[in-house]
Amino acid sequence: MTMSPPSPLIEALQQAVGAAHVLTEGDLSAYEHDWRRRARGRALAVVRPASAEQVAAVVRACVAHGATIVPQGGNTGLAVGSVPDETGTQVLLSLRRMDKVRAVDAANLTITVEAGCILQNLQGAAEAAGYLFPLSLAAEGSCTIGGNLATNAGGTQVVRYGNARELCLGLEVVTAQGEVWSGLTGLRKDNTGYDLRDLYIGSEGTLGIITAATLKLYPRPAAKLTAWAAVPSMQAAVDLLGLAHARLGAGLTGFEVMGQFALSLVDKHYPQLRVPLFKESPWCVLLENSDHESEAHARALFEQLLETALEGGCVTDAVVAENLTQAKGLWHIRESIPLAQAEEGLNIKHDISIPVSRIPAFVEETDALLAREIPGVRLVDFGHLGDGNLHYNVQAPEHGDAKAFLRDEEDRINTLVFDAVARHEGSISAEHGIGSLKAAKLPHYKSAVALGLMRGIKQALDPQGLMNPGRVLTTDSTGTGGN
Ligand code: FAD
């Protein structure tokens, strides 16, 4: 059998990173499938650079040959942004080999890491240095900090520490022209013009490639306590959040809400997890209190808070974890909801945010609307209530063809939910990004002015349109709605 010679682009990529790190055959499915297996593309090649200079050389090779680039970190994204399309012409740029911790500056409370560093390893490096890196999400064992920044990831600690954007001080980026922008500053104040860092954060690989970041570190709390509370309504959950802010102040580091049906799926598929208190209550809340004084202080504050909440009626029952193992068990239940949902079958995910004050009305109205319009619909409702972020997911009816349900109803359901979000002045993507999954919907919920500015930025930074095309902005994105 004769092998055809590699194309000039493949040769240039091999020169950039070494032939062993340009994959064109064999099983590339781990790079080509998205996490939810909603999309499967085909890459011209998977390229695995080991440094910013190699990334720059890859980008220059792609520019010279007019090839488009899809950056990929841990491939855990939920908006279908990190996998190639079906044309077999795109270069899949995996950052996973760039996983080093470059420096810890203790006095400046910063850590500098490469983009392919797995989030859990970054948390571990911070801990080994005696500090906390607070970004935390269920995919932390697989997702990378580059992907976290590219999607401006949120997770479970946003109520105290903010999204990935708030945790980042500086970036190193390879531009769409193949230059390296070294913006790895650890400065907390720097008003010297336009904020380039914030343009790249949340741009989902459509403007350039993040190769490293300088991030904020925090002191580790002396104690962390977790409680699980049954609440009689979403309004009661919002009231409890207000009380927790007032009583715990900056100690409130987590506030998650979980609907009864979501928890019943965990109970059904993972009965060994022993979900507490959900059978008697429409909603449960998971609260976390981080205390810089002592465990006794944390426990006293938590118990006072829960007593007041029980007396006021916004909590009907509650348990406080006795130790770290119990606390981890409670968080594990929360983090198992997406997996239980996947076990149950096909579903439609909505990652929305609404002002916290309007969430009870949103849920009441939208639950009723969907029940009326889509008989048999099952709502898997949970999320980061502390940040106004709900995963308002829709499970196909129990009996029947789930595939046909998605094919026939997904667009209508998305429109019903997103229109309700817009009526309540919310966002159709709180933390997962737009990717290609929501790119067609974005123009309906973002104003023409905002989309025009976004297109101008894209044109200025990536005039050839080579960086992750079709993600975030489609070519015909002319906004009509939003504010
Ligand atoms: P990928 O999936 O590889 O890529 C995501 C996007 O970023 C793509 O558009 C890609 O092109 C781009 N990209 C990746 N790396 C770079 C880079 N270095 N430079 C430029 N662009 C790049 N998300 C949350 O925000 N909060 C949650 O609580 C949360 N929970 C999750 C739970 C589960 C079980 C799963 C599977 C996912 C969850 N996610 C959550 C979504 C996902 O983990 C995050 O979006 C994460 O930030 C993606 O990181 P990644 O390295 O996997 O990126």
Image (cartoon, rainbow, N blue to C red):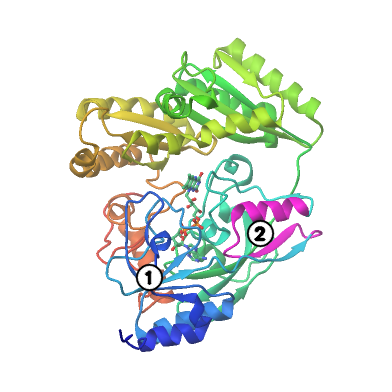
Question: Measured along the vertical axis of the image, is residue 250 above or below residue 103?
Answer: above
Amino acid type at mark 2: Leu
Residue 407 in the image, given as x and y percentages of width and height: 20, 44
Q: Nearer the viewer, residue 157 or 483?
A: 157
Residue 366 appears in view: no
Q: Nearer the viewer, residue 294 or 323?
A: 323
Residue 456 in the image, given as x and y percentages of width and height: 38, 70
Amino acid type at mark 1: Gly
As measured in the structure, the alpha-carbon distance from the residue carrying label 1 to the one carrying label 2 is 29 Å
Q: Residue at x 34, y 64 (%)?
A: 452
Q: Nearer the viewer, residue 368 or 227?
A: 227
In the image, which is nearer the foreground, mark 1 or mark 2?
A: 2
At label 1, counting other C-alpha atoms closer than 10 Å, the crowd grade (few under 14, some 14-19, many 20 or more) is few
Residue 66 in the image, given as x and y percentages of width and height: 34, 82
Q: Residue at x 24, y 64 (%)?
A: 476
Region in magenta? 106-128
Question: In this rendering, would 99 be left or right of 81?
Answer: right
Count of labels in the image: 2
Which residue is identified by label 1? 456
Quadrant location of the N terminus in the rendered image: bottom left
N-terminal of the pair, mark 1 or mark 2, is 2
Label 1 element class: helix
Residue 439 in the image, given as x and y percentages of width and height: 31, 56
Which residue is identified by label 2? 215
Residue 126 inside the magenta-drawn segment: yes
